[in-house]
Structure formats: C-alpha cells, structure tokens
Amino acid sequence: MPFRRKPVLVEATQWFHTGEDVSGVEHYEDKFEGCECSLCEQPLKNHGWVAGEIHWHRVCPGDWIVEGEERPYKPKDFWQDYEKVKEESK
C-alpha cells in the first residue's frame, strides 16, 4: 500500500560552518584536525553533530537542521521532503 507524507509546516535552518549558532548542532573538537569526512570529503574540523536518541549524527556543511528532528538532512533529501512556504504579508 503506498503512503504519502502529509504536509507539515516546520522551521529549518541550513548549517554551513562551525561557529554558526544553529539550535541542536554541536561542534567537533580540535582532535579531528587533519581528518576528512567520509561523506563529503571536507575537513572534519568544519563539521558539527546532532545528538540523536541512540547515537550522534554528523552535520556536514550545507546540511539542513529541521526543528524537532534528531538528524540532519542532506540538501537533496531535504528538498525531496520539504518545499519552501511563502510567508503571508501582515
């Protein structure tokens, strides 16, 4: 039986680098100096992490953080699941 995700309005922020204040994203420590990410091949020192219920999830530069979610979304996955909503003028 096929199912479709119901449209739900969420708040999301795209994360680009350490030092950027995005709710839920912690930064990697300096001990990763010289190491590369196996997902995006950028230096690990430029990454963050989000604590999940069971384990942590790596946040690569450009990943989206959705409020209430315990994992980051890669840009491709984010745009498959979400669409931008026009804000109504008041």
Image (cartoon, rainbow, N blue to C red):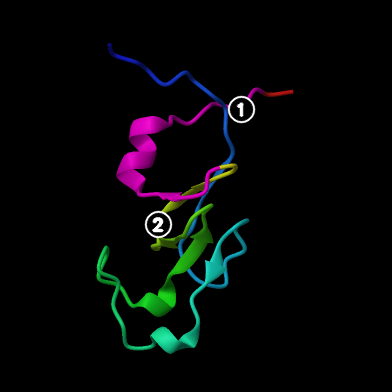
| Front one among 36 and 84 | 36
Question: Which callout, 2 or 1, points to the residue nearer the camera?
Answer: 2
Q: Residue furthest top?
A: 1
SS of the residue under disc 2 = loop
Q: The residue tagged with tag 1: helix, strand or loop? A: loop
Task: Check residue 73 for magenta coloring.
Answer: yes
For residue 87, which numbered disc appears in the image?
A: 1
Q: Quadrant of the C terminus?
A: top right
Nearest the viewer among 51 and 88 is: 51
Q: Is residue 39 left or right of residue 23?
A: left
Residue, far right? 90
- Please tell me whether residue 3 is drawn above or below residue 31 in the rendered image: above
- Quarter location, residue 86: top right
* Amino acid type of the residue that numbered disc 1 sits on in the rendered structure: Glu
> How far apart are the two marked residues, 2 and 1, measured between alpha carbons?
23 Å
Residue 48 lies, in percent from the top left, at 48, 67
Front residue of 60 and 52: 52
For the N terminus, which image quadrant?
A: top left
Residue at (28, 77) in percent of width and height:
36
The location of residue 71, given as percent across then percent down, is 46, 50
Report the residue at 25% width, 69% height from top: 38
Chain part drawn in magenta: 69-88
Label 2 sits on what residue type?
Gly
Q: Earlier in the sequence, mark 2 or mark 1?
A: 2
Q: Is residue 72 above or below residue 39?
A: above
Q: Residues within 10 Å of mark 2 (few under 14, many from 20)?
A: some
As displayed, is residue 68 above or below residue 58?
Answer: above
Q: Which mark is residue 62?
A: 2
Q: Residue at x 49, y 20 (%)?
A: 7
Q: Is residue 81 magenta?
A: yes
